[in-house]
Image (cartoon, grey):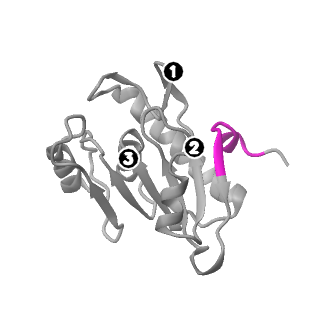
């Protein structure tokens, strides 16, 4: 069976869940220069039983994979961010149908560029993710209107001295979410 266009649009890794944690799917989203295998060890630390869906970013910047373009470090190409957010959302929805997992049980685990697109997915496509762990995300433009994300658990972790994704940006993002 040929996968749907949205699923085949991304090079990705998928592993079905097992045991008690099988209902949850961890959507692993790497940082700049990463791949679909980078966060697999983290997934098993978070949950040995969860299903895993890990797409590789489709944008190349100096040969490094990303999920969306930026104009320069710290400055997003907002038009591309919007387009790529919807592409990723479509991928998750189509992968849920193709692989047979519940989209309401998808928890994004993203680092840096992956954390930023996961946060934007929460803000622009509510209902696609059931929650998120965002590691070193950057502040995002505020959508109008803000979605109702009550009941959607989100963890944000950032370093106090991170010069690329400073804590003030994570605090603004936390306020949005």
Residue closest to the far bottom: 20
Q: Residue at x 52, y 68 (%)?
A: 105
Tell me if 19 is positioned left or right of 163 in this view: right
Nearer the observer, 100 or 124: 100
The C terminus is located in which quarter?
Answer: bottom left
Which residue does the numbered mark 3 point to in the structure image?
115
Residue closest to the far right: 1
Bin the neighbour count of mark 1 within 10 Å (Cα to Cα): few under 14, some 14-19, many 20 and up.
few
Which residue does the numbered mark 1 point to in the structure image?
63
Q: Between marks 1 and 2, how big is the CA–CA gap?
A: 15 Å
Which residue does the numbered mark 2 point to in the structure image?
36
Q: Residue at x 47, y 43 (%)?
A: 30
Nearer the observer, 24 or 148: 24
Q: Which residues are magenta?
A: 3-13
**Nearest-to-viewer mark from 2 and 3:** 2
Q: Position of residue 164 (x, y in %)?
A: 24, 34
């Amino acid at each position: 069976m040929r996968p749907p266009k949205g699923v085949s649009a991304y090079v990705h890794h998928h592993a079905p869940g097992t045991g008690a944690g099988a209902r949850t799917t961890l959507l692993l989203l790497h940082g700049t220069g990463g791949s679909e295998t980078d966060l697999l060890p983290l997934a098993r630390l978070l949950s040995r039983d969860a299903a895993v869906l890990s797409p590789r970013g489709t944008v190349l910047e100096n040969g490094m994979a990303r999920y969306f373009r930026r104009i320069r470090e710290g400055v997003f190409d907002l038009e591309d961010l919007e387009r790529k957010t919807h592409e990723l959302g479509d991928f998750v929805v189509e992968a849920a149908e193709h692989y047979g997992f519940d989209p309401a049980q998808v928890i994004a685990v993203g680092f840096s560029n992956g954390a930023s697109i996961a946060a934007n997915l929460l803000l622009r496509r509510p209902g696609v993710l059931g929650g998120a762990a965002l590691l070193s995300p950057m502040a995002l433009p505020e959508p109008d209107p803000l979605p109702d994300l009550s009941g959607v658990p989100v963890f944000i972790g950032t370093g106090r001295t991170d010069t690329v994704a400073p804590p003030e940006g994570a605090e603004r993002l936390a306020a949005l979410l």
